Amino acid sequence: MQDLIAATEQGSFRETPLSFDIGDTVDVHTRILEGDKERIQVFSGVVISKRGGGMREMFTVRRIVSGEGVERTFPVNSPKVAEVIVKRHARVRRAKLYFLRDRIGKSTRLTERRAKRGDSANQ
């Protein structure tokens, strides 16, 4: 049974995998269908969680809009997600950043992660 599920999922994976981590500030470009037109909408924020695996892998992005916290959860392998652009890497020590939900103002900032010397491919 597991082999059948794996074989079915294999054809639906993204050709180029998305590369980002928890705590990164990202721009998620999503495809929006309005009638017969298609446009790209950008959702910017901090990745606070990744969960699942395989075709069921999801990630949650959080941002502040007009003083209110807004979170959206995106499937990693969805064709609706056009691309994910990493704007900033952050140094975090947790797998889930749910503690950011209770914080407001400057306390929501995360410290930036710098590339190591001689490791320019990491940026």
Image (spheres, grey):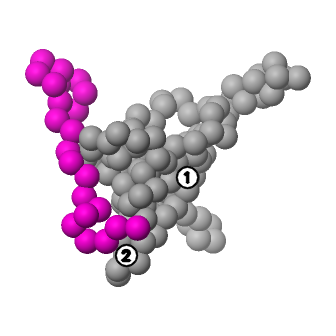
Q: Report if the CB atoms under discs 2 and 1 are less than 8 Å apart.
A: no
Q: Is residue 69 visible?
A: yes
* Element under disc 2: strand
The one of 9 and 90 positioned closer to us in this rendering = 90
Displayed quadrant of residue 109: bottom left
At horizontal 41% and vertical 78% (from top left) the residue drawn is: 68
* Mark 2 vs mark 1, CA separation in Å: 18 Å
Picture disc at residue 65: 2
At horizontal 32% and vertical 51% (from top left) the residue drawn is: 25
How crowded is the residue under tag 1: few (<14 C-alpha within 10 Å), some, or many (20+)?
some
Q: Position of residue 19 (x, y in %)?
A: 41, 34
Q: Residue furthest right?
A: 1
Picture disc at residue 74: 1
At horizontal 77% and vertical 22% (from top left) the residue drawn is: 7
Q: Residue furthest bottom?
A: 66
Magenta span: predominant SS is loop
Q: Is residue 29 visible?
A: no
Residue 74 vertical placement versus 6 (above, below): below
Q: Position of residue 99 (x, y in %)?
A: 41, 58
Residue type at numbered disc 2: Val
Q: Which residues are magenta?
A: 102-123
